[in-house]
Image (cartoon, rainbow, N blue to C red):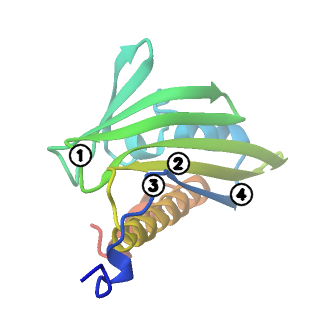
Amino acid sequence: MFGLFKRKGDATVPDEPIQMSVSIEIEKAADDVYALLDFGDERHQLRARGSEIREISGDPLTYRLWYDLTPDMNYLFTVTEAVPGRSYAYSASIVPQIGLRTGSHEAYAIEPISSGSCRLTIVNTIHHAPGMNRRQLDAEIAKSSQAVASSLTKLKIQAEKGVEAVEEFERQLGHR
C-alpha cells in the first residue's frame, strides 16, 4: 500500500563504487614489500605461498592467478601502475563473477619510513552489479572490509616473518 510497509533496507541504493583506504606499517624495506605485490616477481605473496600466476597479456600487462582454494575460478589482474618500491596498482576481476562484485581497482602506495620499514596504503575501489538494496550494500562493504584487512595482515606477516607464518595464521583462522 503505497510502500508504507516496505522495509527501508529493501530500497535500491545508488550505483556507485565503494572506496576504502587503509594503511599499515611494515617492518621491511619498501623494495621488499613491492616485490610481494608485483605479479611479475617470483617473490609475489601468493606465488610464494604456492599459487600459480601467469602473464596472459603484455598489452595491457595482465596476469591470471590460479588460487588453490578455488581452482575453477579465473582471477584476472591488469596492471595500471608499477613504480618499483613506490606504487603498484591493478584492476581485478573474477571469472565467473561471484555474487554482486563485478570488479575492483587496487592501488598501493609504499612510503619508506626507514631503510628497513615502510607504510603501505591501499585504496580499493570496488564495483558491484546495479540494483543493490541497502542490506546487500552493507553486506558487500562488510565482506570487502574483511578481505582488505585479511590481505594486509597476511602481507605484513609474510613480509616480516615469512610464508610459514602466514600458513600458520591461516590455520588458526580455519582457512587451511
What residue type is disc 1 on?
Answer: Gln
- Residue type at numbered disc 4: Glu
Indicate the secondary structure of the residue bearing disc 4. loop
3D distance between C-alphas at marks 3 and 1: 29 Å
Q: Quadrant of residue 21?
A: bottom right
Q: Amino acid at mark 3?
A: Val
Alpha carbon of mark 4 to alpha carbon of mark 3: how far? Answer: 15 Å
Q: CA distance from mark 4 to mark 1?
A: 36 Å
Image disc number at residue 97: 1
Work out whether mark 4 precedes mark 2 in sequence or the reverse, and give the earlier one: 4
Percent x, y for residue 22? Answer: 64, 60
Structural crowding at the residue carrying mark 1, measured as other residues with C-alpha within 10 Å and reported as few (<14), some (14–19) or many (≥20): few
In the picture of the structure, the residue carrying the numbered disc 3 is: 163
> Which residue lies under the disc numbered 4?
27
Mark 1 and mark 2: Cα distance apart in space: 17 Å
Instruction: Give the foreground label among 4 and 2.
Output: 2
**Which residue is denoted by mark 2 in the rendering?**
125
Q: Mark 3 or mark 2, which has the lower sequence index?
A: 2
- Frontmost residue, 97 versus 5: 5
Query: Total label count?
Result: 4
Q: Amino acid at mark 2?
A: Thr
Front-lying residue, 104 or 18: 18
Q: Residue at x 34, y 68 (%)?
A: 136
